[in-house]
Every structure is written in C-alpha cells, then in structure tokens.
Image (cartoon, helix red, strand yellow):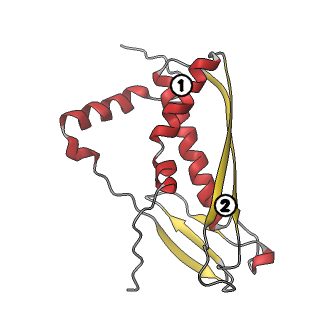
Amino acid sequence: MTTTTRINAVDIEAVAGLANKISESPEVASTVWKSKVSWDGGFSSHSTVRDFAPVPSDEPAALGGTDTAANPVEQLLSALGNCLAVGYAANATAAGISVDQLEVELEGDLDLHTFLGLNPEGNAGFESIRANVTIESDASEEQLAALHDKVVGTSPVGHTLGRAVPVSIHLA
C-alpha cells in the first residue's frame, strides 16, 4: 500500500496526471464549461453547474433587489479570487511550498451610468479590478514572488478578464 503525503490538501498527482495526458494527447485540453441560470422573479436568479446546489444571485436594495445574495459583479470578483486561490494552492504544492493561510481581497470600480441607461455609449463593466493576496507560509519572499508570478501568468479567469473575449448572446 502506498501512502502519499499531501501538501495544502491538494491532489497534485491528479493534476500531474492530467498534464501528462494533455502532453500526450493535446486535443484533451480543449474543454467546454457550462452554467445554467434561471430567473426567480424580481432581480433574483440562481445558477446551476453540474450536479451542485444552485447558487443564488440578487441585487442590493439600492439597485432594486432584495439583497438576499451576492450580485453578478460580486460573483465575478469572487470567481477571480477563487481561481487565484486554486492557482496558489496547486502551484505552491507543485513547488513544495506549504501554505498556512491564503486570502484574496478583491475590489472593482464600476460606474452605474450605463447599467441604468443614463449613458448608453459608456462602459457597463468594471473599469478596473484590484486583487490583494496575503499568504502565510514559511517560504522565502523569493519563492512567494515566483509563485505569485506563476499564478498570475496561468489564471484562466484572470486571463479571461484581462483580454477581449468574444461573447455572443443569442435570443432563442
């Protein structure tokens, strides 16, 4: 029986196995991810992904919602933070770095003029997003800096937000 010691509770062998499979068969890397959103009335909706429990969404009362859940832009910030957390955990583990605590605090600047129809030519999205990462670890500053560069350079959500991505929205 083989016992594997895991760093940061990450199954790095599974990640390495996938990387090896993709190296041998590059077509395996092309994946499609899905989410379904259903409206619940007012500004409330929920998203369903695979077989997980639905994730609610709502708007703050100041925007006409009932403030029962995070709104879509808060969920977008959370998606970036969660993606970065995965990147830190995976890459720290691969580098043999034990992480004691990790926090990613995010904020974004959003002007509501376009969303509210007051400036149809403006930008309804974030003007900028900032993430501050705090890592508690015995690793050196140099190791943490290299880890940070690796994570920022490989984050799928970070890359998606940082460049223009074609989006097509069709009415069925």
User: Which of the two labelled residues, at mark 1 and mark 2, occupies the earlier sequence position?
Assistant: 2
Q: Amino acid at mark 1?
A: Ala
Label 2 SS = helix
Q: Residues within 10 Å of mark 1 (few under 14, many from 20)?
A: some
Residue 4 vertical position relative to residue 49 in the rendered view, above or below: above
Q: Residues within 10 Å of mark 2 (few under 14, many from 20)?
A: some
Q: Residue at x 39, y 67 (%)?
A: 166
Residue 9 vertical position relative to residue 76 in the rendered view, above or below: above
Q: What residue sits right under mark 1 in the picture? A: 146
Q: Position of residue 171 (x, y in %)?
A: 41, 85
Q: Residue at x 71, y 71 (%)?
A: 111
Label 1 SS = helix
Contact? badges 1 and 2 (CB < 8 Å): no
Q: Residue at x 21, y 41 (%)?
A: 26
Q: Quadrant of the N terminus?
A: top left
**127 with respect to 24 (left or right):** right
Q: Amino acid at mark 2?
A: Glu
Q: Position of residue 8 (x, y in %)?
A: 56, 26
**21 with respect to 77 (left or right):** left
Q: Position of residue 79 (x, y in %)?
A: 57, 53
Q: Which of these two is toward me, 167 or 22?
A: 167
Residue 76 vertical position relative to residue 133 in the rendered view, above or below: below
Mark pair 1, 2: CA separation: 28 Å
Examine the image and state in which quarter residue 29 appears: top left
Q: Quadrant of the C terminus?
A: bottom left
Q: Position of residue 146 (x, y in %)?
A: 53, 25
Q: Residue at x 75, y 81 (%)?
A: 64
Residue 81 vertical position relative to residue 142 in the rendered view, above or below: below
Q: Nearer the viewer, mark 1 or mark 2?
A: 1
Q: What residue sits right under mark 2 in the picture? A: 74
